[in-house]
Amino acid sequence: GAVVSQHPSRVICKSGTSVKIECRSLDFQATTMFWYRQFPKKSLMLMATSNEGSKATYEQGVEKDKFLINHASLTLSTLTVTSAHPEDSSFYICSARDARAGAYEQYFGPGTRLTVT
Amino acid sequence: GDSVTQMEGPVTLSEEAFLTINCTYTATGYPSLFWYVQYPGEGLQLLLKATKADDKGSNKGFEATYRKETTSFHLEKGSVQVSDSAVYFCALSLSYNFNKFYFGSGTKLNVKP
């Protein structure tokens, strides 16, 4: 089946530093990838939609200069949290849509736990 | 606005018990409905889906019926197993924007032997 990986699975960084999270589709090409944020006991919140070769589309209220998204290839999207602060601590999940499959199906990565100290 | 509401957990059941996890939605237009499952340490996996009213999605003994009149998509299983312990998410996407998924807050299921 379609597999999406994320790296790292956990990261701890100091306030003011930047951290990059990678999302890879391992056995399919993903023209569109998505980044979600999950708060404790809360639902997943879509942050942005990432299209290969073009600028990401951010949801309302998500700072594009803080959460930099790059989708340089059909199998890789990255999310960089710039100048991280403790309030950015969260669980970040990516998903990818297989261009060959139904338009509405997304495959999710295992998530990255970010802790900012 | 468009949203999904599902019952809060955790839900604790004994093995072979009947499971129901309630999910209701609010949507403009005609949504497709989904149940995703997240096992510990893993990503969300699609469990089942239904794309129009009265459709029944089913997989691995789980079922959910798209009820337009009650705007519901309740998840059921007749006999749960310990291996079903996970977090279950109800979600919807809209026909005019398949990119955007709206998720419920998730319901943790604990099945005891």
Image (spheres, coloured by chain):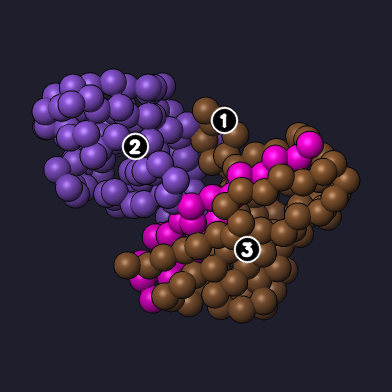
Chain colours: A brown, B purple
Q: SS at mark 2?
A: strand
Which kind of residue does numbered mark 2 sit on?
A: Ala
Chain letter belonging to callout 1: A
Span shown in magenta = A92-117
Q: Which mark is residue A40?
A: 1
The residue that label 3 is drawn on is: A22
Q: Residue at x 40, y 41 (%)?
A: B40
Queried whether the magenta region covers residue A110, the answer comes back as yes
Q: Which mark is residue B86?
A: 2
Quarter of the figure with residue B13? top left
Q: CA distance from mark 2 to mark 1?
A: 15 Å
Q: Residue at x 36, y 71 (%)?
A: A101
Q: CA distance from mark 2 to mark 3?
A: 25 Å
Q: Residue at x 79, y 36 (%)?
A: A117
Above or below for A67 versus B28: below
**Depth check, front residue: A68 or A11:** A11
Does the residue at mark 1 contact the one at mark 3 (Cβ under 8 Å)? no
* Image spot of residue A1 (x, y percent): 32, 67
